[in-house]
Image: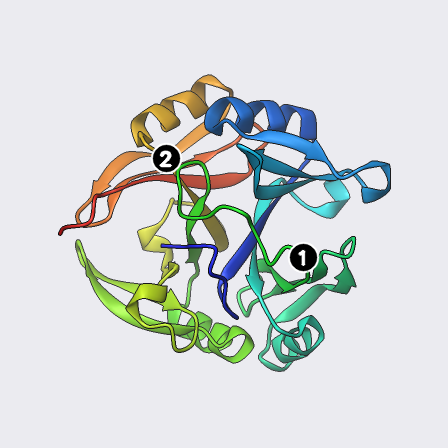
């Protein structure tokens, strides 16, 4: 699971692009207790979701020309420019060249070999999210991709990520960790389409830790969102539901199983 001990290659930010920032703030506020703070008139509609004063995500108002409503997962890099170049060399792409973000870091939006967008963030201050791995915050990410080996090769070349196989009900699960971090550094996984929601294109999916996955799924639906996968027990992992907000941005919740002593 994620913590705020960010290292190169680890997810260190998530950002919501939505056509209705006020509506999204209302949805996530009711669901997770988040409060949205605008970054100011010069920030292009950008701002921050906070929980108890700790930043747990970013948010931006977008137009249809900027793409569909979605959550973007960002990964820490020591050099955004170099990472963008490597993405192109590794047969990925660059949607947005590296730019400075209000003195808080340097970011870029890239695409992997399957065309899945993701971000990289060369940290300034803060290094990343203030809270991770705790209720109401990012705790896991998954990539749904048609070619797991190709994804593993791409993200190893671009972000230095390492993969390993773990037993999973019905087969194995491809775990992902930053280089040299070992089992304790695992932050997510790569999942083939058969292991994810049916009929969806490849995408990164952020997971938010909750105390009650069933209540979160029911709450999302009551607030105008959608339940793509009802709350389900996964042995040794916890109880998971895959959801979408009222504008179609996909995310998941997980009620993590207690660790055995």
> Where is residue 233 drawn, in percent x and y?
21, 39
Picture quarter containing residue 120? bottom right
- The label on residue 125 is 1
Question: Badge 1 local density, few (<14 within 10 Å), some, or many (20+)?
Answer: few
Q: Nearer the viewer, residue 97 or 229?
A: 97
Q: Is residue 221 above or below residue 164?
A: above
In the rendered image, residue 67, in percent from the top left (x then y), is placed at 68, 46
Quadrant of the rendered image containing residue 77: bottom right
* Image quadrant in which you'd find residue 180: bottom left
The percent position of residue 149, horizontal first and vertical second, equals: 39, 74
Q: CA distance from mark 1 to mark 2?
A: 27 Å
Q: Is residue 61 visible?
A: no
Q: Relative to residue 234, is residue 113 depicted above or below?
A: below
Which numbered disc flags the more N-terminal residue, 1 or 2?
A: 1
Element on which disc 2 rests: loop
Q: Nearer the viewer, residue 73 or 64?
A: 73
Q: Position of residue 78 (x, y in %)?
A: 62, 73
The residue at which mark 2 appears reads as 210
Q: Does the CB distance between marks 1 and 2 fall below 8 Å?
A: no
Please give left or right for residue 4 compared with residue 93 in the image: left
147 relative to 59, above or below: below
Secondary structure at numbered mark 1 = loop
Residue 104 appearing in the image? yes
- Horizontal relation, residue 191 to residue 249: left or right: left
Tag on residue 67?
A: none
Q: Residue at x 36, y 49 (%)?
A: 196
């Amino acid at each position: 699971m994620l913590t705020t001990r960010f290292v190169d290659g680890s997810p260190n930010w998530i950002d919501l692009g939505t056509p209705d920032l006020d509506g999204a703030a209302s949805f996530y506020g009711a669901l997770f207790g988040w409060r949205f703070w605008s970054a100011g008139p010069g920030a292009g509609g950008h701002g921050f979701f906070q929980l108890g004063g700790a930043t747990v995500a970013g948010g931006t108002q977008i137009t249809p020309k900027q793409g569909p409503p979605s959550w973007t997962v960002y990964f820490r890099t020591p050099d955004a420019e170099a990472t963008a170049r490597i993405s192109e060399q590794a047969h990925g792409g660059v949607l947005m060249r590296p730019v400075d973000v209000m003195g808080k870091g340097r970011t870029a939006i890239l695409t992997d070999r399957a065309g899945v967008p993701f971000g990289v963030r060369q940290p300034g201050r803060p290094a990343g999210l203030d809270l991770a791995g705790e209720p109401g915050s990012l705790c896991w990410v998954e990539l749904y991709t048609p070619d797991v080996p190709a994804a593993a090769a791409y993200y190893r070349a671009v972000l230095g990520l390492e993969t390993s196989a773990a037993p999973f009900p019905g087969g194995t699960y491809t775990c992902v960790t930053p280089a040299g971090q070992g089992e304790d550094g695992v932050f997510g996984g790569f999942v083939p389409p058969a292991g994810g929601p049916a009929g969806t294109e490849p995408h990164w999916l952020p997971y938010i830790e909750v105390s009650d996955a069933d209540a979160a799924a029911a709450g999302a639906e009551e607030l105008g969102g959608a339940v793509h996968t009802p709350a389900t027990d996964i042995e040794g992992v916890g109880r998971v539901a895959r959801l979408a907000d009222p504008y179609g941005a996909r995310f998941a919740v997980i009620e993590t199983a207690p660790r055995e002593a």
